[in-house]
Amino acid sequence: MDKLIINGQKKLNGDVYISGAKNAALPILIASLLSKEELKLKNVPNLFDIKTTEKLLFAMGVEISKTDSSMTLIARDIKDLHATYDLVKTMRASILVLGPLLARFGSARVSLPGGCAIGSRPVDIHIKGLEAMGASIKIENGDIVASTSGLPEGKLVGAEISMSQVTVTGTENLMMAACLAKGKTKLKNSAKEPEVVDLGNCLIKMGAIIKGLGTDIITIEGVEELNGAEHSIIFDRIEAGTYMIAAAMTAGELRCIGIESGKMTSIINKLRETGVEIIESDNTVTVKSNGILKAVSIETSPFPGFPTDMQAQFMALNTIAEGVSEIKETIFENRFMHVQELIRMGADIEVNQNTAVVSGGKMLEGASVMATDLRASASLVLAALSAKGTTVIDRIYHLDRGYEDLEKKFNQIGAQIERVN
Ligand code: EPZ
């Protein structure tokens, strides 16, 4: 299993180019199932989860061709409407094939995603929404088996759906299903994340009729079929936020290039509160830090609030920043797996249910630690970059799921990271 060896306390200076967003690319690749024509994508990040999605779509019969970060997908002859357990268990986002397969082919069998390190992560809202559109859904041998055979012309029917919680992939699944349903669908309490908006913009280019993207009510007017399109994936605001915190924690000066800062307001505002200087220009955000940081409390919430995917990274910053801070995780029930590992490096953190109290001002020390989930791994990298001495991070396949060329990008700006297996 690969490990990262990181020698800490190197100031990070220079330019880092931000890749396409994992959480926009995954649903957009899967949206190719909705049309028999070519979907041409640019700025697709080279990540393990993207490879898993390609495997899943290829197994169904989607023709895929790739050059660097461009990808073309054609779902002309789909022969297999089944997302098997061995693929779904490695990537929960596979649940996103359910809506498109039902909408276009009237049938789907998708392994019920299990829980994961950060929580139980049910998909009840996805299922309730598809049933509201007329699908008949049952659970059989661990699979979600869905069909529209009982419906006129076997087509989903538009419906008014109020989602009981803000769910990113729930909104995406139902929005994709509604594109080919008969009539109008209204999704209430929709997710407003930029990645959901990017998917919606791509669907509109394919011929979908969608209004209200970025608000909590999205309406979709079903159409007969969707066409091909060309689309460039939005930048990854979580990757960008991770590099910004790295600069803050190493008293560096970093230009993050390829960013729309208006989509990172909550992250930028919280970082400014720690005392770092942040300069926003058209597609670049520059972070300057003198290494003197003030601890800042955060509470995660759906967009435009502070993203749960940045919680672990910000906690790493608070462990070395001056003062006591509170970190409240409101989205997932078990997203503090990084706490014990940070404590091994000298952090002072106490967890009480979904709140962590961080007593900062510590000088972290290198240690052997273990990654448990994608963003927890990122927080360990950040801690290691600022720690005295050497850190060894095990099980870094988690990192490869969501960070393209991580050690290459960090070493180009002054870090000392080596990958060993
Ligand atoms: C997406 O996960 C992201 N993944 C996650 O990113 C991200 O942390 C999360 O949204 C929140 O922003 C992708 O987009 C591929 P949710 P998702 O449905 O859609 C509950 C990363 O690190 N819920 O918005 O699975 C759920 O339990 C990953 O890149 C239900 O109860 O998250 C959670 O408490 C990690 N029933 C809350 O809603 C449902 O049917 C939000 O989950 C669906 C969700």
Image (cartoon, grey):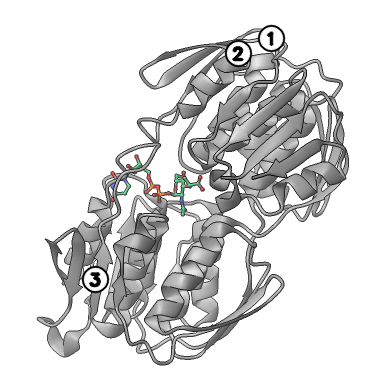
Mark with earlier residue (1, 2):
2
Mark with earlier residue (2, 3):
3
Circles 1 and 2, Cβ within 8 Å, touching? The answer is: yes
Secondary element under disc 3, as helix, strand or loop, is strand
Residue 12, image x, y percentages: 85, 34
Secondary element under disc 2, as helix, strand or loop, is loop
Which residue is under mark 2? 347
Characterize the local packing of mark 1: few (<14), some (14-19) or many (20 or more) Cα atoms within 10 angstroms: some
Which residue is under mark 3? 109
Mark with earlier residue (1, 3):
3
Residue 231's image quarter? Answer: bottom right
Residue occupying the point 36% across, 46% down: 166
Q: Is residue 15 visible?
A: yes
- Amino acid type, residue under disc 3 in the picture: Arg
The label shown at residue 184 is none
Q: Which quadrant is the N terminus positioned in?
A: top right
Q: Would you say 73 lies left or right of 78 here? A: right
Callout count: 3
Residue occupying the point 47% across, 78% down: 32
Residue 96, image x, y percentages: 37, 64
Residue occupying the point 78% across, 48% down: 409
Residue 246's image quarter? Answer: top right
Tell me how far mark 2 sits from mark 3, CA to CA: 45 Å
Tell me how far mark 1 sits from mark 2, CA to CA: 6 Å
